[in-house]
Image (cartoon, rainbow, N blue to C red):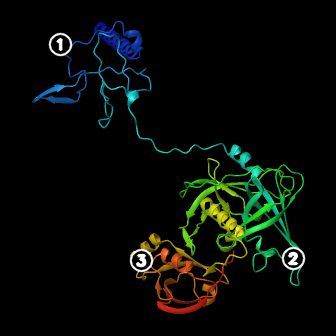
Amino acid sequence: MKNRRLFRIACYLASLLMIVTLTAGCLSDHVDPRESASTETPFNPSISISESIIPKTNQTTVSGETKPDPIVTVDNTMPSDHSRTETTSPSEPSYSTSHDPAETTIPSDIDPSELTLPTLPVESPLPLQEIFETIVPTVVSIRVIIPKTQLYEQREELFSGLIVEPVGIVITTYSLLEPALDYRSNLIRGASISVCVPGYPKAFEATLTGVHSITDLAMLRITNPDGILFEAATLSKEPFLTVGTTVYSVGYPSDLIAQGGLSTGYVTSIYKTTYQENGAPVGLLETDIPTQPYYAGGPLLNTRGEVVGVTSGYLKRVYHHRYGYAVPSPVVLDVIRQIKERVSRKPEEPKKASFGIVVMGDKDYEEIRERTDYPEGLYVTRIKPESAAYTAGLSDGDILLSLNKTSMGRLDDLLLFMDEQIVGSLVEIKAYRPSEKRTLTLSCYLKEEQP
């Protein structure tokens, strides 16, 4: 009985000793390395360490001999900059190990500050509120009064526009203005245009400078007898846009809204650039921002506040209503140039002849030909209504083969041909229609260039 009691006491003491030993070991593991640095034994390569206690390290082979890598104590308080290694004293050797074999160690004789790393262009977004407040003074409301006719009562169209020059030049959508125009794209009798500019209590009258129906753009000029200089937006000449780019649409809100007119979304599609018969580009952006009538004609901006497009009011009725469409800013700039040239043209100058087609770029059509059996030619993407090509019977998707027996293999062929033509010239057309898999022979007389 006594022996059993002694045995139990011995077991209890052994257990207590084990608990004390384990507790002391855990506490020693959590000691701050900076506190133990003064008492830590300096590294001595001659000291042998039992492999049963220290886990095996990576082996390094030098001159046929296998040597273990130095054992390194990692300081958990190391700063985030891993390119620097702190030592406990200047006399101690320092070692640097890589946690990832793929990492590269910078030699000690190279200053890291002298290294130049490749950088990628990083977009610096601006706060959305700042973008909105900056562009709002340039976004105007356009009210078009259409007089009463035999078919319709007097009505009005209300949409947005963008001031692009301080003297009062406004760019907007053509389609919502079209009901007030005649067949020559002039305002019909009794129609009027007024523009409401933010910060001004009364609306300004405006005149129509010109239109560009293919791109759905129109240019107005605010009647400004007092010579007021308005705030104007700058159109981006080379906007960097990809599918998924965040964009903002801004329009002039209705009379029931105190503040607003902002919509956010993404670029969902970028249409291929096509070309008119004079070489001018035509483009289109698709976004997931449905264009409301009030906001049509307003700007489309990126996250840096740059105007990358002008929203269209016509295409939203042609395509799916869940999406919105905008004309890219480089195309808008080119249209402004074309309208100004047309206005400055003297009356005695001969009118330019027009065929009325828009074609795909040479490179894009070559890519289509690689996967189809289409012949060499110009891929027609759009026919202008009431144009010579429309009268002849050409359709979207036809491939123009020749005009007056002149091969139309490239865009330059069309440009050179049209430069030599005059209004009223007879043109024999040869085209291939893929939908019917047949070649067409048509003819027409070239008409006067229309806006």
Residue 20, disc: none
Any part of residue 87 in sight = yes
Q: Nearer the viewer, residue 325 or 114?
A: 114
- Name the amino acid, label 1: Ser
Any part of residue 323 in sight = no
Q: How far apart are labels 3 and 2 at the CA level? A: 50 Å
| Residues packed near mark 2 inside 10 Å, few (<14), some (14 to 19) or many (20 plus) | few
| Residue on which disc 2 sits | 189
Q: Earlier in the sequence, mark 3 or mark 1?
A: 1
- Name the amino acid, label 3: Arg
- Name the amino acid, label 2: Arg
Horizontal and vertical percent position of residue 34: 41, 12
Relative side of 362 to 91, left or right: right
Horizontal and vertical percent position of residue 126: 63, 43
Mark nearer the viewer, 3 or 2? 2
| Residue on which disc 1 sits | 46
Can you say which quadrant of the picture contains the C terminus? bottom right
| Residue on which disc 3 sits | 369
Q: Earlier in the sequence, mark 1 or mark 2?
A: 1
Horizontal and vertical percent position of residue 427: 56, 89
